[in-house]
Image: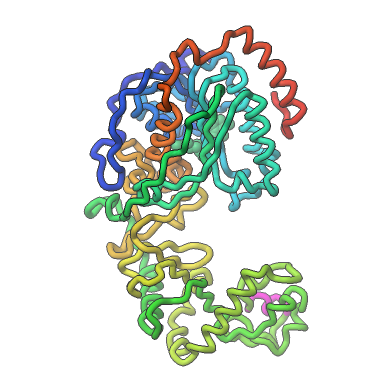
Amino acid sequence: MKDDRVGAWKDTSWPVNSGLSVAQPPQEKLEAPRSLRFVDLFAGLGGFHLALQDLGHRCVFASEIHPGLRALYKENFGMEAYGDIRQVDVADIPEHDILCAGFPCQPFSKSGKQNGLDDPRWGDLFSYMLRVLRHHKPRYLMLENVPNLERHRKGTTWKTILELLDAAGYEVEPKKLSPHRYGIPQVRERLFIVGDRKELDGFEFPPETNEKTSIRTVLDEKPPNAKGLSEQALACIKVWQNFLDRFPGRTLPSFPIWTMEFGATYPYEDTTPFVLGAKGLRGYLGSHGTPLTDLDEKSVFAALPSYARTKQERFPEWKIRFIKQNREFYDHHKGWIDKWMPQLMRFPASWQKFEWNCKNEPKDLRQMVLQFRASGLRAKRPDTAPSLIAMTTTQVPIITWEDRYITPEECAKLQSMKGIKLPDTPTQAYTALGNAVNVHLVGRVARALLERQPIAPKLDLLHETREDEDLDDAAALEESRAQMPVALT
Ligand SMILES: C[S@@+](CC[C@H](N)C(=O)[O-])C[C@H]1O[C@@H](n2cnc3c(N)ncnc32)[C@H](O)[C@@H]1O
């Protein structure tokens, strides 16, 4: 690695947490006990960097594989980020006091393939991070990942990770945190893991503030780049508003509305369509009451809801419950539903499902935040935005009362990254923001970790001697070779 790749920290006057609006609760600017050095691995947009810089610490090395994000890192922080962490010679990474890493979550995410540490593309990255830890032995560790990391493969992946961190010499503490419990209007539960090579005595994750939030606090007035809703999306929202208007009760039930069950009779409790096959389904009714009798095999399954076509001998309990609840709902409300339903039929199947997550709220979609999801059109109270996600941009939250999607700049505020330079295209910006860590939350956790009493130790205590390191390193490496499911290069 060339020296110039390891950018020197530059004191940029970064507008982080400036103009702290209601969306970014004011943080008292503390004098850092002393300026610590940190590395930002899997840097992305630099969420860790923003938070630690704001606390007076300085970045001495960053790594990010995506060239576009690296270019942005230079613009935003005035330093070069190195590329693929696998290509870095650990000895070239400068000494540091804090290692930060939001290592890629795809292998552990519920929405991914769940290959974990064996994932061919990303699974080994944890071990590369570990290599940096073992070599440099920074005093502190701050990691972030999806909450499913703890549950992945029935907890065995998590156990391995804890053992490896322990073997590397860290006392660690994990906690699931979401910005919406700290004054930021985004629900985004993530697993934060902090570590200390000495001990975590006196460390507590920051107490939740649970103050009232509103998505309105991040909205700009008539943002010029706001993307409006398509005619089809507007029409679909109107049809669901009509559903709410016709529904005679005060509030909708909490189960998802699966209109395909309205009029359906195919068996689902003791058996499944997969078990019965096309012949066994003769005489029954499929989605929206479609007769299954005179159809060829392919058409029979096409006439069933996609969730009922799964190759299962028994549906999971939740699915059985939702089908039952929807059929009962239809029996009860058939009179008005039959008049309402024809207007819904021209929309794609996922738009024919609806989730009302606004118990006790007025039945007015224009007051709610909407999202077109694979599971249906979801309505949520406007106090928080749903979690920004990187996998797809079709689920960008809708500001219904303004007939538009939330803009990337507004999403940046949901990540407490107000004012940073974002990727040029909205798709890239939404993706990067969906991958990022919330800066306000990192700041809160970092202060809790670094500013414990007694105040952070003097810098010369932060590192053990090189001789100690070499001995520890050899032992740790041997141990990890025995344990790691992936080869260390
Ligand atoms: C979950 S995101 C972390 C986002 C970051 N914490 C932020 O605040 O934006 C993981 C990042 O790791 C990067 N990445 C993936 N593989 C990498 C590798 N081999 N070396 C360096 N970065 C990598 C991805 O491009 C992605 O930006």
| Residue 483 drawn at (x, y percent) | 74, 30
Queried whether the magenta region covers residue 150, the answer comes back as no
Does the rendering let one see residue 65? no
Is 362 in front, or is 232? 362
Residue beneath the point at 47% across and 76% down: 253
Q: Is residue 175 above or below residue 375?
A: above
Residue beneath the point at 31% across and 67% down: 367
Q: How is the image coloured?
A: rainbow
Is 247 in front, or is 406? 247
* Quarter of the figure that contains the N terminus: top right
* Residue furthest bottom as drawn: 335
* Quarter of the figure that contains the C terminus: top right
| Residue 146 drawn at (x, y percent) | 55, 45
Residue beneath the point at 52% across and 83% down: 329
Does the rendering let one see residue 113? yes
| Residue 351 drawn at (x, y percent) | 48, 70
Residue 298 falls in image quadrant? bottom right
Instruction: Give the left or right position of residue 216, taking residue 280 as reference.
Output: left
| Residue 416 drawn at (x, y percent) | 35, 41
Majority secondary structure of magenta residues = helix
Instruction: Give the left or right position of residue 150, taking residue 83 as reference.
Output: right
Residue beneath the point at 63% across and 10% down: 468
Q: Is residue 328 above or below residue 140?
A: below
Is 243 in front, or is 152? 152
Q: Which residues are magenta?
A: 297-303
